[in-house]
Image (cartoon, coloured by chain):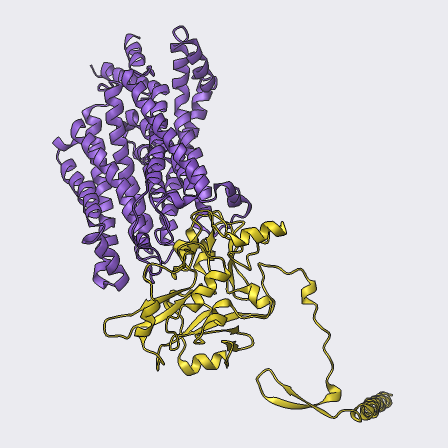
Chain colours: A yellow, B purple
Amino acid sequence: MENNNENSRRKFLNNGLKIGAATAIGSVVLANLASKLTAQEDSAATDTMELMTTDGTIIQVDSASVIEAAPKHEHEEAYNVREGMPNRKFVMVVDLAKCKNALKCQVSCNKNHYITGDNAWLKVYKMQESKETAPYWMPTLCQHCDQPACVTVCPVDATFKRRDGLVLIDNERCIGCRFCMAACPYSTRVFNWSEPNQGEITMTMDMEGKSAYSPEHTGFPSIKGTVDKCDFCPHSIAEGELPHCVTACPNGVFYFGDKYEDTVTNGDETFRFSQLLKNKAGYRIMEGLGTEPSVYYLPPTDRLVDFEEGLEHFTEFQSVEKPE
Amino acid sequence: MNKYDTLLNDLAPKKFGKKGVIWTSFLIVIIIIGIIAYIDQLIKGQVVTNMRDYALWGIYISNFVFFVATSFVGAVAVAILRLTNNAWRTPIVRIAEIITFAAIAMAGVTIMIDMARPDRLLNLFIHARIQSPITWDVIIIPTFLAISALLLYFPLLPDFAILKNHYKETNPTASKWYGKLSLNWKGSKAQKAIQTKSIKIIAILILPVALILQTIDAWLFSSTYRIGWDSTNFAPYFISGAFVAGVGALITVICVVRKVKKLENYITEFHFDKLGKLLVLACLVYLYFNINEYLMPLFTAKKGEMTHLDTLFTGHYSFLFWMVTIGGLIIPIIVLLFKKGRQPKAMFVIGLIVVLASWWKRYIIVTPTLLHPFLPIQGVPESWHHYFPSLHEWLITSATLAAALLIITLLVRFVPVIPIQRTADEQELLETEKNTKS
């Protein structure tokens, strides 16, 4: 009895497996056949497509297997100013070898942010580390640190760090304690000591009869008793444009881009961000402090123009031109 | 009973004399001028100060630090002397508590004067972020204010009850108010038990709270990268500095109150001797931390550190630095080490110098550091490279100092500066001891 039983079980298992395998193979074959039949119809119209992968190589793909992705409706979700633009990480590279203190960046920044104070947000420092080392021009703006000292000390969350890398200020919340200014090692923060006399923009706003304030366009308007600084121009990025300093620079000093896309551009040339830093030994200022800035610098080597040429525009005591 | 009457007559609050009226009106005038200046600052913005983007904090902040430091005296006099069973503290504790209360109240006001948007004060609560040292300040200052108010008030209950009876016929209104303030104090056993227990809890509580207050005050600075502030030594340095400022203020106020209220029999040279020794101790500890803070960085001589120290030792702030260090620290130590130096008159002068030096000390802690940022100061008007307070700042700051003095003056006027009940009890105890011995 026992033997019989065992035999019948083996038989059953054996058969079962065979049937199972046959059905599996059969279904695959059928599916293949079916897909081939349908594909033949499509490939009669087009054959292959060239596409670029995320690492930059060009590949050929059977156009039949290319399916149009459903558009992501990111914009339909409420845009959060404190979260920033999704899946972006903005960076800047400043090529010190090209800077000759033309100051067009500063003028453009001052104009487009309606700066009326005495301290520009973008400054070109005349630098010289020691007597023997070469002098150079160093444009400095908010470094949009990933470990921002200013954000840590703000008591009311008026200055905040976004996912897209930007450090911005909510001027409608700032209490004017200036702790962030004391905390910032790069001295990039500027205070509205008095009512900013911004003439034209107050007039536009009066005409439109609305408060146009957004942390994404600092200086529009500036608010008395609060802190301002470079905002990396998210208002330009949103319109598909580069920040004002980048477009204004005649020497292509500033490269702006997205770290996730690994590209930076100064408008004329576009580079792979990581490759550019690698080739030209990019660095960040005061790396030792651990603030992790988003602004990178390329050392002032092989300069096209003499440092002295920049002296023509250098003003020790002025960074914002006053209307006469 | 006769002895008790003289005690009561000596210690009960008296009306202002002519000098008192002039002094009080003088303070009120300064405060009014300060308020006018402050309103002007509100209207025009902080452009009326000489603070700018580099010297972004000025005397409002250093004055705030001074007030916070001075408020430390309550903790020292009350808690430390109490916990160490120093019986000589009796006639000075109340003055110390009054100074503490006035100083911390004005510290709170001063920090708000520095805020450019006081209209957004509530944001500190609505949007509070716990990682900011300012939020810690927002928590600790009201806490300390409440504790120091209670520490002043609880021991006053029996005295208010005494004053209620004392003024029953001569001044019914005053009697009524003292009666209300005494919370129906009868001196029963149960009341005394509650009072003693409450005072004990608060006296112990004020010590950690005061230490935390001074520490947070130091962390306001040392939580930044700035050279001269970025120091792990800063909190104990501030605590010891507060010890000096507080005891200095206490000695000065005691000298004046003693003279005006003719309390020579109660606050004797013995007390001055003790206070003098306390101040020497404070100064020596502070000197130690000063050496840590200013001498040790010389050895590594980092570039930024050297620029900072140069401005203090030989540069723009050297006069103030040496005045504060030698005049406010070394000379007091030398003078007070001698018994003759611990006489009331000498002590008054020393106390005054110590208080003045303490104020300027905060000024040179705050200002020079801000004028030496990591990147060079460029592209701003020449005047932004320096800082000296504007007229508005002086007027407003003077008003805060006057307000602190006014609070002290009014409390000294209406509250018995020397605990009546306690002094009576102690004298009685002394009498019985004498009787039993003889």
Residue B294 image point, x, y percent: 23, 54
Q: Is residue B144 left or right of residue B303?
A: right
Query: From the viewer's perspective, is residue B242 above or below residue B223?
Result: above
State the residue in front, A55 or B75.
A55
Q: Quadrant of residue A282?
A: bottom left
Q: Quadrant of residue A31?
A: bottom right
Whether residue B343 appears in this view of the structure is no
Residue B242 image point, x, y percent: 30, 41
Tell me the residue at 25%/35% (across/down). B248
State the residue in front, B52 or B164.
B52
Residue A262 image point, x, y percent: 53, 78
The residue most toward the front is A324
Q: Quadrant of residue B195?
A: top left
Residue B162 image point, x, y percent: 39, 14
> Which corner quadrant holds the C terminus of chain B?
top left
Whether residue B207 appears in this view of the structure is yes
Q: Is residue B219 left or right of residue A32?
A: left
> Which corner quadrant holds the N terminus of chain B?
top left
Tell me the residue at 29%/27% (across/down). B92
